[in-house]
């Protein structure tokens, strides 16, 4: 487990080799095993293989080219209706966390299978929603291009943990 977490890096260059539906489906099943507020699973996954949709998503994401070149792209969404039970906190926080936790499970599983991915958060949400035709209660949260790596992902440094950790109080 620790090896998988340590070994994962963002991957932004992909081989053209296809990514099977089985691996995507299994990744999404595992994604939905992530915790969610009240187990309401206020997240939805849009699997994009259509070249025109990928191109439009790339445009919505400030021309991040790897969205177009990835064999498959999964858009992780927050579902504001499914989280309604928790009111404002549910709509403004929990459903986003539900979606984010799913992204992390998904990317770790993909890495364990030799696939690469990158979490794309920089996009115009209204444009992405229009491209995907999502209803008003569904917010695209992360665009995740997936493919077999054609680059060795850069091992990016982290801050020393002790700079981030606070004990007992801030
Ligand atoms: C919320 C969030 C938004 C991100 N948005 C983008 C993005 O729009 N484009 C991109 O290339 N990478 C994006 N990333 C990936 C980060 O750049 C990357 O995770 C970070 O630099 C650490 O590198 P690593 O994933 O290889 O460990 C995003 C990651 C997160 C968690």
Image (cartoon, rainbow, N blue to C red):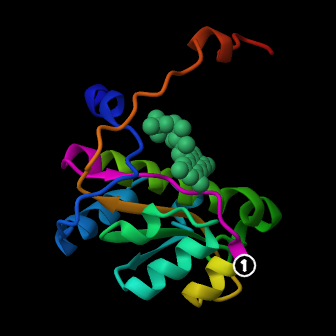
Task: From the viewer's side, name the closer residue of 135 and 117.
Answer: 117
Q: Is residue 47 left or right of residue 126?
A: left
Determine which quarter of the picture holds residue 74: bottom left
The N terminus - image quarter: top left
Q: Judge whether 49 appears above or below 141 on screen.
A: below
Place of residue 98 in the rendered image (x, y in percent of width and height, measured from the top left): 56, 58
Q: Judge whether 54 appears above or below 52 on screen.
A: above
At x 79% / y 67%, what residue is drawn? Answer: 87
Q: Is residue 135 left or right of residue 27?
A: right
The magenta span reads 110-126
Task: From the viewer's side, name the closer residue of 111 and 168.
Answer: 111
Q: Is residue 7 visible?
A: yes
Determine which quarter of the picture holds residue 91: bottom right
The C terminus - image quarter: top right
Q: Is residue 136 left or right of residue 16?
A: right
Element marked by disc 1: helix
Place of residue 127 in the rendered image (x, y in percent of width and height, measured from the top left): 68, 80
Label 1 CA crowd tier, 10 Å (few <14, some 14–19, many 20+):
few
Magenta segment includes 143: no
At x 46% / y 55%, what residue is drawn? Answer: 103
Place of residue 111 in the rendered image (x, y in percent of width and height, measured from the top left): 27, 45
Ligand 1 picture quarter: top right
At x 33% / y 45%, what residue is drawn? Answer: 108
Place of residue 55 in the rendered image (x, y in percent of width and height, measured from the top left): 48, 79
Q: Which residue is mark 1?
A: 126
């Amino acid at each position: 487990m620790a090896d998988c977490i340590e070994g994962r890096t963002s991957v932004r260059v992909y081989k053209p080799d296809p990514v099977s539906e089985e691996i995507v489906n299994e990744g999404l099943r595992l994604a939905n095993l992530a915790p969610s507020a009240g187990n309401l699973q206020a997240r939805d996954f849009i699997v994009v293989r259509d070249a025109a949709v990928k191109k439009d998503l790339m445009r919505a994401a400030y021309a991040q080219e790897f969205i177009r070149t990835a064999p498959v792209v999964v858009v992780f969404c927050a579902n504001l209706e499914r989280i309604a039970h928790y009111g404002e906190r549910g709509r403004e926080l929990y459903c986003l966390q539900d979606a984010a936790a799913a992204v992390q499970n998904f990317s770790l599983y993909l890495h364990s299978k030799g696939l690469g991915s990158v979490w794309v958060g920089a996009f115009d949400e209204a444009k992405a929603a229009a491209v995907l035709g999502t209803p008003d209660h569904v917010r695209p949260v992360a665009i995740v291009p997936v493919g077999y790596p054609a680059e060795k992902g850069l091992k990016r440094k982290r801050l020393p943990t002790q700079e981030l950790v606070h004990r007992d109080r801030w």
